[in-house]
Amino acid sequence: MASLLSIQDLHARVAGKDILKGINLEVGAGEVHAIMGPNGSGKSTLAGVLAGRETYEVTKGSVRFDGKDLLGTPPEERAKAGVFLGFQYPVEIPGVGNLHFLRTALNAQRRAKGEEELDAMDFLSLAKEKAKLVQLDAAFMSRSVNEGFSGGEKKRNEIFQMAVLQPRLALLDETDSGLDIDALRIVAGGVNALRSKDRAMVVITHYQRLLDYIVPDRVHVMAAGRIVRSGGRELALELEEKGYGWIGAEGAGKAKEARP
Amino acid sequence: MSTTETLQELTRKGYQAGFVTQVEADTLPPGLDEDVIRVLSAKKNEPAFMLEWRLKAYRHWLTLKEPSWQAVKYHPIDYQAIRYYSAPKQKPKKDSLSEVDPEILRTYEKLGIPLEEQKRLQNVAVDAVFDSVSVATTFREKLYKAGVIFCSFSEAVREHPELVERYLGTVVPFSDNFFAALNSAVFSDGSFCYVPKGVKCPMELSTYFRINAADTGQFERTLLIADEGASVSYLEGCTAPMRDTNQLHAAVVELVALDGASIKYSTVQNWYPGDAEGKGGIYNFVTKRGIAHQRAKISWTQVETGSAITWKYPSVILKGDDSVGEFYSVALTNHRQQADTGTKMVHIGKNTRSTIVSKGISAGRGQNTYRGLVKVLKSAANARNYTQCDSLLLGDECGAHTLPYIEVKNATAQVEHEASTSKIGEDQLFYCRQRGISQEDAVSMIVNGFCRQVFKELPMEFAVEAQKLLGVSLEGSVG
């Protein structure tokens, strides 16, 4: 079966600086892949490029999602096709109600699929049900999008949105950063509940500890804009033991070669 | 699509109230002198006190200089090139709508303000002002039964001269400022409302102002009196055709809230703002002020999206003890629009309280200035003020300025001021779009969120209107 997400020789730059220098990655439906790597290795840039952030410029390579070219489409079209990005730093939107925001998003996606829009009542019951997944209470839902949320609440909100939007590809960008152990358990529990045979997930993390809770099918290690190692779950444990210095030298060496 | 493109896309929606109505008009030639004022007053069959007042105002105006302290730029106005009176020709007095020129009725219909009985907004009485005169006032019967007088200003001068004479100029005297003096001399019509003691006005009152004729100034005057313990909610809306010359709108609004009365005054201003290059548009130079007696409350809510230049400071004189003043404002400037707007809260009585919430949105090359004065007099023990001024910038060529003036003469006063400036970030837009929301919807969602505190003060149906208007007015911005 063809991969749901297929990345080939992807190069991208941000503000004139080359960040991704030839990424190759295949993720099949039902799989959970973890991408690890030190700060500045290009993990978040990869997530941003896949979601369509316009400040990132793709200079080479291709990305196919469900057999179709992904790179030529604007972010909202990618979202409607089922690409979800769980943000490392969820953005605050003052004055815009959390539920209003999410219903607008869901209905935009439903319209794109030719489905009927959900009215406020139906949406509310859906939201209530999904909120349980990450233990969010009703008061939280009536607040403005991410405004005044703690770090943990913001991340739970991301997973809550994912649960409502039911994407086919979830890119979770350092969802574990800034979480204490209880929040981490809640978030991981939400993610695990959303694993399904139709859905692919790419979990980006700096630390191995998230992978104690979300057990990946594959682990990739990025350094200097490339995937330098791929393996099973044991690769993450090996990394934990030896640190990024272990692959750092190797990765940096390769990156140097790649320069013109 | 980039932010720039989407905002430009929104431009093309353009100004939707910019058509011209063909009606025969009774118009005075351009120019202003005492004879013009005499003719104008005679055409309206005004009592002698009214003409006297106009002439005094005119003579005073001649001694004044146009103000130049405000942060707006425009070519000098030639006051002799303006027509001071333009009225659609019609029978002298309309007893029913069938006597109003059907072209005018159609104009209001096109603007979404049907005046015909069966189509009227539920529970909103409308006074429609077309160029210089009031053409129709709806729901008069029902209001009359409640004791509420709601009619055109001209009619009030004829039928309730004692009320007009008693209150006219008591809040904004003709000597107040250059434009108020000009208005006092030449005002042609406007709305008048009196709510008697203890009466809660049974419906929303509304005046809809329309400038139609070219080179005409609109100088209307609104006088609203809420007697002791009375309450009323009042809304005004404004539009004008698109013309490439500037037109002057110099109105005066006076509110009198007697002991224990409450007045809520909301404005949705959508005068023609001029084109993208700043050609044409209305100069909106308006003086609005209310006086609150003991325990009275005056609340101004304004949504200002139109006009080439907006210069207005709806104010409250908190004269009585325990009186309350509020000012909630959204001002949007796009293209080359300029706004210098804010409020004055003058605390005179004890335990007086005021709240100011100002939201300025600048886009394109628009310039937006908040200018506000909080003045606490020696007599105002325990006065309190809370001021919040937020500015939102869309793009790099616009400007936002905040100029709060605070004068406190009583040490027991508490005055708080908060201000913020933010930009609609790529981050916010990307976040929305990543969830499937189009850029256009995202911009309007973010801007509406920014204004929510003010919109929630508007009567329900107008809050919806204001949100739509904001969407349309967010024309091509980030350059």
Image: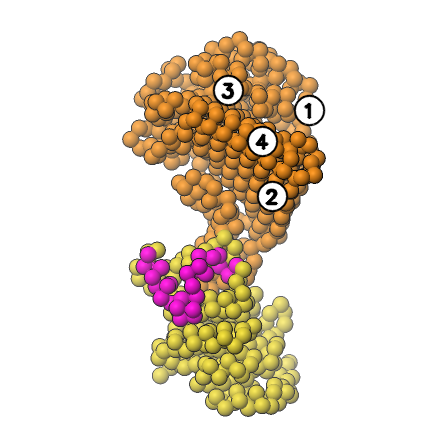
Chain colours: A yellow, B orange
Q: Which mark is residue B188?
A: 3
Q: Residues within 10 Å of mark 1 (few under 14, many from 20)?
A: few
- The residue range painted magenta reads A121-147
Q: Amino acid at mark 3?
A: Ser
What x and y, as percent, mark residue B460?
Answer: 41, 41
Residue in front for this viewpoint, A211 or A24: A211
Front: mark 2 or 3: 2
Question: Are the residues flagged by discs 2 and 1 in contact, CB closer than 8 Å?
Answer: no
Asked if the stretch drawn in magenta spans residue A145, the answer is: yes
What x and y, as percent, mark residue A152?
Answer: 52, 69
Q: Amino acid at mark 2?
A: Thr
State the residue position of label 1: B65
How far apart, in angstroms, are the residues tagged by discs 4 and 1? 36 Å
Mark nearer the N terminus (2 vs 3): 3
How far apart, in angstroms, are the residues tagged by discs 3 and 4? 36 Å
Q: Secondary structure at mark 1?
A: loop
Mark nearer the N terminus (2 vs 1): 1
Q: Amino acid at mark 4?
A: Asp
Mark nearer the N terminus (4 vs 1): 1
Say which residue appears at 61% left-offset and 41% top-offset.
B385
